[in-house]
Image: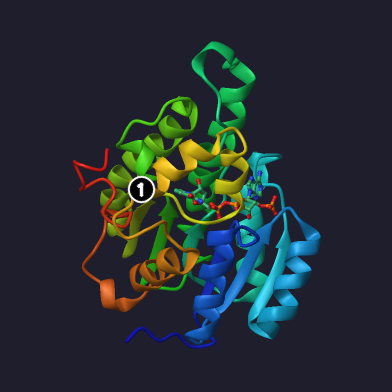
Amino acid sequence: MVKFDSNDVFLVVGATGGIGRAISAKIVSLGGKVIGVGRNADKLKEISAALGDSFIAEARDISTDMQSIAEWVRSLAERHGKLRGLVLAAGLQDTRPLSIVKEANIDEIFSANFKSNLLLIKGFAKKNVRQAGRCSCVAISSIVADVGIAAISVYSASKGAMNSAIKSLSVELARDNIRINAISPGHIETEMLQKGSKFFNEEYLQKLHAKYPLGLGKPEDVANLTCFLLSDASAWITGANYIIDGGASASFFNQ
Ligand SMILES: NC(=O)c1ccc[n+]([C@@H]2O[C@H](COP(=O)([O-])OP(=O)(O)OC[C@H]3O[C@@H](n4cnc5c(N)ncnc54)[C@H](OP(=O)(O)O)[C@@H]3O)[C@@H](O)[C@H]2O)c1
């Protein structure tokens, strides 16, 4: 059984999203403390009210002023306690066929889904920022880094870049006892899925549901796995990428 205590401080980036919010709530329910980051101040306020004192809200756009990210992470640890873990759950999805992809779209998606994440990990890995001995970072990637879905090539590539970086970082950061893993969810019922779905008709959505032997995922499914990977119960796991997709990618006949 995973348990945290009030000294277990986790930085959750993307805490205002469907998945990040569920992860924050799960950490708090297990006894830990969350510094939750997002851009939407109203959502941060609402989550603070729901989760109480164990949730510390920090508004920030991680795609701007990126050179200050590592120093900002240090200042969070100074104010709220050294970090036991980092959760990378912010992300931008953009449904865009190749014919209308522009350089600016590539920059925008890679800034939010890859560049900022590397700089957040760099900040977290500093000695004066993290707790000694038992630190863990979890990045929410996506199944589309490994399976093909049309019109999301830039998003898929940004997730694939993250997965590759995690392999290298797991080796590099093991020397400092920092573990780092990816979780690759299939379709999870959050705002991101709703935004993507507005481009598709009812028939497409029905086909999407049919591809999932266990139905679409819930943010809590991802939160449970994240907390396991943040905890000492996964002490010998690093450099891994966990697919969590209700059997969709294992299933041949539903394709
Ligand atoms: N939902 C799915 O089906 C699914 C499947 C596979 C992987 N994922 C991945 O899971 C992660 C979470 O997705 P979700 O479904 O929870 O999405 P969501 O509900 O749309 O939330 C996205 C989160 O990212 C934050 N964010 C985006 N750009 C940001 C920026 N520049 N600075 C700071 N925060 C930023 C948003 O903050 P604000 O709202 O405050 O701006 C929000 O907290 C993403 O990495 C996504 O790619 C999702």
Residue located 52% across and 85% down the image: 29
Q: Is residue 38 left or right of residue 23?
A: right
Q: Is residue 108 above or below residue 232?
A: above
Residue lying farthest right? 42
Q: Position of residue 104 (x, y in %)?
A: 64, 20
Q: Is residue 133 visible?
A: no
Q: Is residue 251 left or right of residue 38?
A: left
Q: Is residue 171 above or below residue 59?
A: above
Q: Is residue 16 visible?
A: yes
Task: From the viewer's side, name the closer residue of 11 and 243.
Answer: 243
Q: Picture quarter containing residue 82?
A: bottom right
Q: Is residue 120 above or below residue 132?
A: above
- Give amino acid for label 1: Ala
Q: Residues within 10 Å of mark 1 (few under 14, many from 20)?
A: some
Q: Is residue 131 left or right of residue 245?
A: right
Q: Determine the secondary structure under disc 1.
A: helix
Q: Quadrant of the N terminus?
A: bottom left
Task: From the viewer's side, name the closer residue of 224 and 82.
Answer: 224
Residue located 49% across and 80% down the image: 8
Q: Quadrant of the C terminus?
A: top left
Ligand 1 neighbours mark 1 (CB distance < 8 Å): no
Task: From the viewer's side, name the closer residue of 167 and 146.
Answer: 146
Q: Position of residue 44 (x, y in %)?
A: 73, 65
Q: Position of residue 212 (x, y in %)?
A: 33, 52
Q: Picture quarter containing residue 168?
A: top left
What colouring style does the render use?
Answer: rainbow
Q: Which residue is mark 1?
A: 210
Residue lying farthest top? 99
Q: Is residue 244 left or right of residue 76?
A: left
Residue located 51% across and 87% down the image: 31
Task: From the viewer's side, name the closer residue of 229 and 146.
Answer: 146
